[in-house]
Image: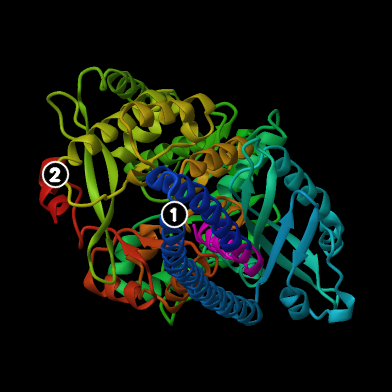
Amino acid sequence: MGKLGFNRKHHSIKKITPNRSAFNIAFIYLIYGVVWIMTTDTLLEWMVGGKYETYAQLQTYKGWVYVALTAVFIFALVQRTLGLYEDAKTKLQDSKDALQDQFEKTLTSEQRFELAVKGSADSIWEYDGLSARYYMSNTLLINMGYLDQEIKLVGLEDWVAFIIEEDRLSFLTYVSEFTDVPTESFQVSYRVKRKDGSIAWIRTKGSAQISDSGKIMKVAGSHTDITLFINHQDELTKIAYYDRLSGLLNWHGFKLEVQKRIDNDPDRSFTLLYMDIDDFKNINDFYGYTIGDALLVEISRVIKKDFSSLGLIANLGGDGFGFLIDGDETPVVLRFIEAIYHTLTKIRPIEGRQIDVSACIGIAQYPKDDNNFEELMQCADEAMFEAKLKAKNTYVFFSDDLHDAHLKRIELANTLRKAVDKKELFMMYQPVYDLTDKHVVSMEALLRWRPYGKDLISPDIFIPLAETSGLINKIELWVFEEVFKQIVEWRKIRSRNIPIAINLSTKGITDDHFIHSIISLMEKYDIKAGEIEIEITETSLIEQAETALANLRLLSGQGIKILLDDFGKGYSSLTYLVSLPIDVIKIDRGFTQRIHSSKEIDAVISTIIELAHLIEIEVVAEGIEFENQMNYLKSLGTDYGQGYLLHYPALPKDLEDILKQ
């Protein structure tokens, strides 16, 4: 609009140039004179006929009239011309002032941008898709020890030269895929070499300008040094894989190693032992948790000393221990168990107290009892429970006599199969609060099951059952549609948008057809991206990782926030956080419930929150039940909180007041 206005002003200035104005006045005067002479002479001749004296006298009068009218006419023309000049002069000055003002604003904006670039530790870059030229500010490379004269960044290949050889191909492949099928934004992480030879991790983010034909016109973004975060991965990996007290593998580390064994050598048999210390709760109650923890450390020490060379050992949580033994020959297993019982007699006094330790052991064997870790541990757990019913220091093999538990699971699965059609499933919702001012920022959709005529069945029971029995997709699709229907209803009463987080299983996130079914349901109910969020668990990132990643990017590309649930409970998140489109992590309730139980736990929670914020990921703390937990999390800068202290899960009708606020 501004350019158009200026062009009009410039056009009017051209029309009143001196030569043009002089010509216009002379031309108009000529026409006026010719018309006057021809018209008035003819008129006079007609009026006086042949009277010459009268004609001569009238010619004199006519001359004076002509002079008077000419003076008036010339005055009007000159005045108008001078007025146009004055108006043009004013407009020209206005245009000049506007251009000067715009120049000053542009200069100020450029100065601010230059200061921002200089003040940032990141480097700003731009790639021109038309000329294939690459520009990057030198800040990052200077911070990595390079001198200005050593930095030459004309094309993308100049930046690629700084990337270590092992990462170049993957980086160029990613760039090539992005170029072939461009999206509005992208993110990739890789390693570069500093001047001193050390390695730095870089995260590159960018936004693209794409033409109507789908070609990249420009891409701009930043290079960020995320080495600090990556360097903390070893520490966090140890937290994820190993038990803090004993230093042994924890449940997740044990699961990972056992599953590797199954995947890499499926024909090789082995035996799993699940050992649980007898009456350990009584030991804690009688001696206190400090003595109890010290006892667990001592038990771990002696079994690690005697058995670490013979197979895998793990602390499966609290007073539970796991062992993997090669083979499934009964004599070998029995000798191993007898050796464990003998080792437990070597426990040293704890703070001057000699504590007798006994344990029950459940035994499950691969592939005889099952062929995956979860089921094998379930078998071993059932066998251990049976052993505890018999006596202390007892072991039990999983057998057909214990298979009744599996039959009950099958019966429950059949009941669950009909739950959707019988309308036994229903949804509850738990609000998530901003810990700063305690206003509701979102809700989590929670599935519940009450079989007809029976009590509620815990999701911890029926969700894994649905996954193993192949029912999870049908149930999840029902969940998504129910939540979408609820959103449509809540639109009628809510005062603002409150997004609903929906849990997505491993089966769901790795099923392309299921993901497209979700998108189709969104279109059916006109669900906007900001109205829902997707929660995934760390486990879902392990199986079919490439498919899961592609589907996550598809959902994220729809504008849907991705939440990583139970963070810290598993083992995959530390690897994927910097490369997956994760917007929010939810700290596992196990950490929240152990706040102030030890300095180490508090340090871990603080580190998780700090590192998440470093990579621009928001944090939700789950399982907040006490004020001191909430206050501590708030002091660490935790963004959001969820738990019984803030609000119990509730039926939709019980949340209407919150939606109206």
Frontmost residue, 316 versus 455:
455
* Residue 55 disc label: 1
**Classed neighbour count for the residue bearing mark 2: other residues with Cα under 10 Å, few (<14), some (14–19), many (≥20):** few
Q: Position of residue 206 (x, y in %)?
A: 63, 56
**Type of the residue with mark 1:** Tyr
Residue 526 placement, left or right of 488: right
Q: Are marks 2 and 1 in contact (CB under 8 Å)?
A: no
Q: Quadrant of residue 389?
A: top left
Identify the main secondary structure in magenta: helix
Q: Secondary structure at mark 1?
A: helix
Residue 152 occupies which quadrant of the picture?
Answer: bottom right
Q: Nearer the viewer, residue 121 or 571?
A: 121
Residue 146 seen in the current view: yes
Amino acid type of the residue tagged 2 in the rendering: Ile
Q: Does residue 265 sit above or below 499 in this rendering? A: above
Q: Position of residue 143 (x, y in %)?
A: 74, 80
Where is mark 2, residue-wise? 493
